[in-house]
Image (cartoon, grey):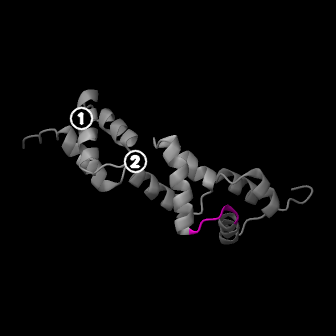
Amino acid sequence: MADRPRPTALEAAQRLLAAREKTRAQLEQALLRKGYAHDEVLDVIARLATLGLLSDRRAAELHARKGFEAKQSTAAVTRKLTAIGVAEDEVEEVVVRVQDDVGHDDEAAARALLEKRRLSGVKAARFLASRGFDEALVRRLVRLDEGE
């Protein structure tokens, strides 16, 4: 049985995008890890973007929507978008728009998480902090008894 020929960078990129929406930076990193030449990767990314198959904005909106639906904080969603390579000026715009679309509010999200997990005290505070909720909100929602 003969080995299959290695897919072209374009074919590999299309498979990656079929599985999940990606930013340019994510796609570039994935293709480089697969061993494709940097110039070839940049050409493929430009071609896919021109065809409308690759969009940082679309990827950012998808990731933001998923984050807010998972009750992540605004700060956590913002950090995620920055980490996946979305331009700083687009991050703020996408976060605000998606927040409005899904009706996200950090306080309501934090309260829902605490209720769902039935957490209180130090465990609740640590959990909310790990989800990126700011300290003032955590203090407002979680009462820490002396000795906890």
Q: Residue at x 50, y 56 (%)?
A: 64
State the residue position of label 2.
56
Which residue sits at x=52%, y=61%?
98
- Relative to 73, is 100 above or below? below
Quadrant of the rendered image containing residue 62: bottom left
Ranked by sequence position, the earlier of labels 2 and 1 is 1
**Location of mark 1 (residue):** 43
Q: Seen in the image, is 104 located left or right of residue 148? A: left
Give the structural element (helix, strand or loop) at label 1: helix
x and y, in percent, of residue 84 in the image: 46, 43
Under mark 1, the amino acid is: Asp
Image quarter of residue 146? bottom right
Name the quarter where the N terminus is drawn.
Answer: top left
Judging from the image, what secondary structure is the residue with disc 2 in?
Answer: helix
The residue drawn where x is 23% and y is 31% is 40
Q: Position of residue 55 (x, y in %)?
A: 35, 49
